[in-house]
Amino acid sequence: MENKQSELIRANSANIGAIKLELTGGDAHGLRPYVFETAWEVANKVGGIYTVIKTKAGVTVEELGDHYYLLGPYNEHSVRTEVEVIQPENKVIAAVIDSMRERGVKIIFGRWLIDGYPQVILFDIESQRHALSNWKKELWDKTYISTNVVDAETDNAVLFGFIVTWFLGEFRHRVAEDALVIAHFHEWLSAVGLLMTKMRSIDVATMFTTHATLLGRYLCAGHVDFYNNLPNEAGDRGIYHRYCLERAGVSVADIFTTVSQITAVEAEHLLKKKPDVITPNGLNVVQFSALHEFQNLHAKSKEKIHEFVRGHFHGHFNFQLDKTIYFFIAGRYEYYNKGADMFIESLARLNYMLQSSGSDCTVVAFIIMPTKTNNFNVDSLKSQASTKQLRDIVNHIQGKMGAKLFENALMGDIIDPKDLLDKDDILKLKRCIYAAQKPQLPPVVTHNVVDSEGDPVLSHIRRVRLFNDHKDRVKIIFHPEFLSPTNALFSIDYEEFIRGCHLGVFPSYYEPWGYTPAECTVMGIPSVTTNLSGFGSFMEDHLKDPSSYGIYIVDRRYKGIDESIQELADVMLDFTRMSRRQRIIQRNRTERLSDLLDWKSLGIYYKKARYQALRKQHPEAFLILTDDDIGASEEVKSEAAVEN
């Protein structure tokens, strides 16, 4: 050990600059680490972690090259559509895969067809289902964590974790002795792999990232006053075994990270450990060469929304589109956590304030949250069909009128305006106009919701009586399905929809990060968030006056619910009073923040976490480096000092 340490010190002392290069991805002395990033959502879309890993892959591959591997579960559908299956070029990886295949493990190696083209290794957990009982016993014997419960998700986590541990052990055994290896695990579903890697004393540096604590999600879903009264309820909610896996993973990892400061507070209380590094979530930002380009995209996308709105309010279209503002909330149907309750309540107050002030501005508020539906709402389909028929008739008449004008002008005559419309054309127009007259108000929902009586969103809309009445200045459209270009009713891509709106409203109560306001920001669309979301707290830390950049942060942490609702209503009212020119200027300022959320800027936090983990596992390799070189946290600095 002493000889190996001396050799490393001599090698390091020879070229300090080369080592610092290695820490940013260089490979001057072969010290670039192998990084195995493990998550249930690698090439397997389940939730938000899929987006994190997918968007981060590009900058990570740029840093680590072919030393970077993503480990995940085999999903046949995803592999067919997202993965190019190939043979591994690395001889050690190939030998490990061959060895495991010989012992019955089904493994797929390939390249994920996303930005960066990263290498993926996918394990079919079903191929080792027969080993589940033995592995559960080993987990109990070594950690005293019982997983003998009826829980298919936990069974999958155990299978996945042991196979990953098997792979890491084989790789560590076959790779060069001085090779540096990092294993990065995401969320409780991969925690078994981390635990067993430690229990089997496999020589790899480990990281564990929680994107949201298990107990936090369950408590908030149960309407507990989460931030003022944090109880221990894992046992009561039937997730004690999952909680134990998560907490044990946090405890034994060399480096523990989480995605925001607000989640760090939550983790410190519920998981009893303060994160070593905060690793904010980023996006792959597409920069425009000129500001007017994304403004043009806004105008084009807004016209698509105009088309839908014309159809939806057909027969009750009593407002001007050039004086209409589009607000929206979108995401998983977590009525309370995502702040849908607060959004609807604030819209009711906004409606009253706009009516009282005599404003001619109309707000159309979209709620895009998927829930169980039977089919499209018949009234919605009829309205869209009637609008299309009217447009076809008008286009036909318009063509005939143009031909008449041209023919008469060609002969040197000015046609009498009375002769432009035939009696037959007038009759067709009258039929369409009369057919549009209907007693019932435009629907507030575009689909037939299965449990419409008990649906929280619809119940709240009924309670505040926002029924899209003629006198209402705020109109509501609840679209209980994700947007898609193939949607027969509202054919628009989600990104286009965001670009076409004026303001995204996300008054979340529980949001460890918050990709929706971040997506708005990189597209130049202002948004409302809260100081209980990771995104909101991140922006508060980095901007002196977030609202001047179109980032409105509502206080839900220190104010009562009624005060927060009024604050949101006031923010939306002030937004409706902005002129078109003011909104354009604000969109330009919002778009300038995109660099702040680009993975090219935020990837550095993961890079620092990786090398903090290496230093903790192999302090001898970093003796000549200062703590600032690797961004070491105070806790890691003190531990390294004790070890040395």
Image (tube, rainbow, N blue to C red):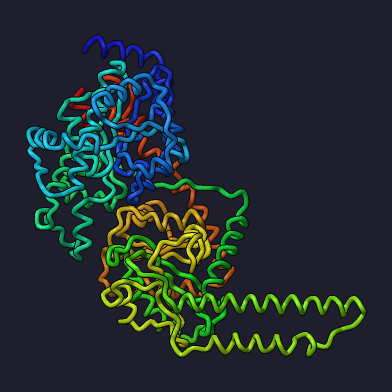
- Asked whether 117 or 563 is in front, the reply is 117
Instruction: Locate residue 20, reporting x and y percent.
Output: 40, 24
What is the x, y in percent for residue 4? 26, 12
Residue 38: image x %, image y %?
A: 30, 37
* Residue 611 versus residue 502 in the image, above or below: above
The answer to whether residue 21 is above or below residue 123 is above
> As drawn, which residue projects farthest toward the right?
412
Q: Residue at x 42, y 71 (%)?
A: 376
Q: Residue at x 33, y 42 (%)?
A: 75
Q: Residue at x 37, y 31 (%)?
A: 109
Residue drawn at x 50%, y 75% is 577
Residue lying at the far top in this picture: please name it.
Answer: 3
Indicate whether 605 appears above or below 619.
below
- The spot of residue 519 in percent (x, y) is 44, 55
Left of 440 or right of it: where is 102?
left
Q: Is residue 406 left or right of residue 399?
A: right
Q: Quadrant of the C terminus?
A: top left
* Residue 525 appears in view: no
For residue 313, above or below residue 231: below
Residue 246 figure quarter? top left
Which quarter of the rendered picture does the N terminus lie within? Answer: top left
Q: Is residue 8 in sight in this rendering?
A: yes
Q: Nearer the viewer, residue 630 or 493?
A: 493
| Left or right side of 326 for 415 | right
Q: Is 577 left or right of 236, judged from the image as shown?
A: right
Which is nearer the eye, 25 or 105?
Answer: 105
